[in-house]
Image (spheres, rainbow, N blue to C red):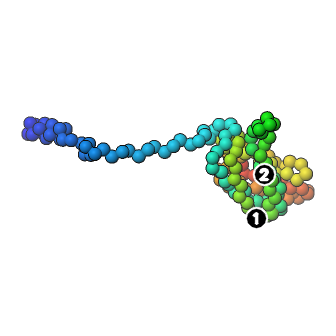
Amino acid sequence: MKAFRLLAILVLLSLPAHGQDNPVPLPQPPAPPPMVPNSEGEVVDKPICFNVINKAPYTVVGVFSTNIYKTKEGIEAKHRANFRLETGQQTNFCSLGPFFAGRKLDLTLRSLIPLFSCRTAITGDIIIYGRRKDEGGTDTWAACLK
């Protein structure tokens, strides 16, 4: 019985592998992403889009800004996008960067002065919250993504 198993194993090992005469090319592995997501100042080829939703019971005004970049003239600058959202309104933003580490942008909510600011990832919806204070005024903030 042992001789039969050994013979069967030797016969199987000596058979040519399937497709050896006509090898099938292996598919190419996917290309690596253009940049490492944690790199400071990253700029991407395709825009990354996200929604901003106002859940505050009043209109909010804010601005998204990118990391610093140098213009052709050598001047340091940032891309900025202002927004104004009524209660319950949402809008869509897209950015190519340059991002802060982790594909983040700066968000500032303001009136005449800045009310709230954070550095947020743009991997999902950014929700703005607020409440009216009993003594007057408001508290306004956003759920910034890590």
Give how far apart the Cα atoms at labels 2 and 1 are. 20 Å
- Label 1: state its secondary structure: loop
Q: What is the count of numbered marks?
A: 2
Tell me the tag on residue 88: 1
The one of 82 and 140 positioned closer to us in this rendering: 82
Tell me the tag on residue 20: none
> Residue visible at 76% across and 64% down?
88
Counting other residues with Cα less than 10 Å from the Cα at mark 2, is it few (<14), some (14-19), or many (20 or more)?
Answer: some
Q: Pick whichever of labels 2 and 1 is earlier in the sequence.
A: 2
Residue 52 x, y percent position in the rendering: 72, 57
Residue 55 x, y percent position in the rendering: 76, 60
Tell me the tag on residue 81: 2
Residue 45 x, y percent position in the rendering: 63, 46
**Would residue 109 be seen by someone viewing this image from the given angle?**
yes
- Name the front one of labels 2 and 1: 2
Residue 40 x, y percent position in the rendering: 68, 37
Are the residues flagged by discs 2 and 1 in contact, CB closer than 8 Å?
no
Of the 4 image quadrants, the one containing the N terminus is top left
Q: Amino acid at mark 2?
A: Ala
The one of 66 and 142 positioned closer to us in this rendering: 66
> Residue visible at 85% across and 51% down?
110
For residue 137, above or below residue 78: below
- Label 2: state its secondary structure: strand
